Amino acid sequence: MRYHALLTALLMGGLTACATLSTPTAATAPAASTGPQRSTDEILKSTTAADWRTVSPENLMLMDVAGKTVMIELAPSFAPAHVANIRTLTRSGYWDGLAILRSHENYVVQWGDPNDEDPKLKRSTGTVNNQIPAEYERPLQGLDFKALPDVDGWARLGGFSEGFAAASDGQSAWLTHCYGAVGVGRGNPPDSGDGSSLYVVIGQAPRNLDRNITVVGRVLSGMEVLTPLPRGTGPLGFYEKAEQRAPLTRVRLAAEDPSAPRLQVLRTDSAAFAELTENRRNRRDTWYVRPAGYTNICNVTVPIRTAPTN
Amino acid sequence: MRYHALLTALLMGGLTACATLSTPTAATAPAASTGPQRSTDEILKSTTAADWRTVSPENLMLMDVAGKTVMIELAPSFAPAHVANIRTLTRSGYWDGLAILRSHENYVVQWGDPNDEDPKLKRSTGTVNNQIPAEYERPLQGLDFKALPDVDGWARLGGFSEGFAAASDGQSAWLTHCYGAVGVGRGNPPDSGDGSSLYVVIGQAPRNLDRNITVVGRVLSGMEVLTPLPRGTGPLGFYEKAEQRAPLTRVRLAAEDPSAPRLQVLRTDSAAFAELTENRRNRRDTWYVRPAGYTNICNVTVPIRTAPTN
């Protein structure tokens, strides 16, 4: 009985409808819709091929850790220079044999070169450009961005672009630090990140990092491989001993691997996504006493699937 | 260098200033303050005994898992009947030898009786009252509640009460499903939870559960014991085999254990908390390019400490 309750609770992870670029407020959030509500399975089964975007193999990074594969979609629309570096590093085998350096409770898991700070021991990043600009935001114009009607708080507008949670002030747009977002470690100079040190958000969205560090993509699958790693016992959750670090046994682009899966992401400008979103905002399941009437970009799950073979 | 960057990033986890009960909006969030900014250590060192509330030993639940102790503060101001049941269950040794049943990625870790649903095998809850009412909300009146000036989205007001993240519509108040919040599993009937099955939020705050299930407290320390547990491979992250479940070796109230620590929580109506909050909302560290100018109750960390011995 409790299992059912928790199943119901699980299924109502929020997704929400699309809106114009007017600034939303809590008061403008749509009221609960009425009438029959289709299940998530029913909605996804009724989608057509046009509702799904196939992830470019050039943007799909496959990272093997602890015998499993984490799949990351890179976002060149938001961070072209950093994504170019990450592709170059991946193709050169830079990551192979490097490790998870840090697991910081309710914050991030970070990976890269344990000898990052030792000029003598650090692994060469080869031909990548270490002098790229920070890519914290980009013009909203020319971007496929759909805002939610729900107030965001951290930004004037919160929404989705190409399946990525994003925000905008009406002029610029940026990827947000939601759960699963992948970003580029940097030092104090805003342009000091080159893509050779990456982190993923594993806790409550630290949206205060938005526009302070370059976000390059998000984990599409495999978060459950990274989040249970033991928390590091050093400052900031860094591991203190080499043997505590889970090795990156192999990191590649799907474009390099004929056996890589073809992943698809539900289009966040599709009617199916809008319906899922509204359903999640206002559950009408037996279990629920009070539909939330609200959701947030970091509470939304954008469905993915393996491309149908036909 | 990256370490420093991430240290800085860590320290700016948001906390924010207190406000009246007017409905905040993003636009009303205070502008960044100016002038020198004291560090968190400086602020905490300057606090006096009056700034700290000692957690009642009757409200401090100590749960031993995997050789470590998770400390949970119960909130009788919000869920008196459920807290009374949990105290009775704990004193009776109900939990000893039970287990973690579930680790659900980006959602909850749940514990209780693996045989919960088998009338023949389930452990007796003894004399606890299984017919208690749901405790989803309570009157705001009479509660020490301080709202943040920042828009919440999920509720008209988000703030803190006795160190617990809470929300209000101006009439009622309720504990919110922020990271670390502890709630009571229930079935479809709203009053079907009795406190014998508990869960803790380990991911992005599922605020859509607010006022749909009874929240009884929060984890004060030991989240890092629960969050790295392997994710369950069954539906909803339930473990499929008995050997996958981490046992609860011992669960007790601090009131029963002379060796239990005396924990204190920084008063969320203190000037120190307001200062920490404003500092976190608008970091002026070298690393930051753009202060957020906003925070959220689920991004705030309420400091705790062991009571000074003198």
Image (cartoon, coloured by chain):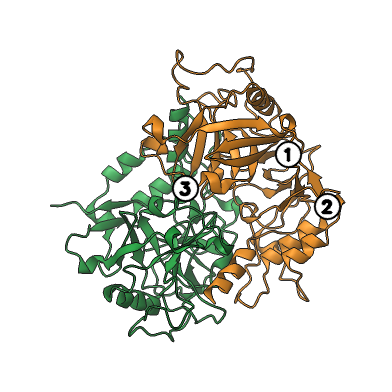
Chain colours: A orange, B green
Residue at 42% x, 39% y: name it. Answer: B11
Going from N to C along the chain, the mark reached first, 3 or 1, is 3
Q: CA distance from mark 2 to mark 1?
A: 28 Å
- Dot 1 amino acid type: Gln
> Between residues B28 and B42, which one lies in front from this camera angle?
B42
Local packing at callout 1 (Cα closer than 10 Å; few below 14, some 14-19, many 20+) is: few
Mark drawn on residue A171:
1
Residue A141 lies, with reference to residue B65, above or below; the image says above
Going from N to C along the chain, the mark reached first, 2 or 1, is 2
- Dot 2 amino acid type: Asp
Residue at 69% x, 63% y: name it. Answer: A29
- Dot 3 amino acid type: Asn
Q: Are marks 3 and 1 on the same chain?
A: yes
Whether residue A211 is visible = no
Tag in front: 3 or 2: 2
| Quarter of the rendering occupied by the N terminus of chain B | top left
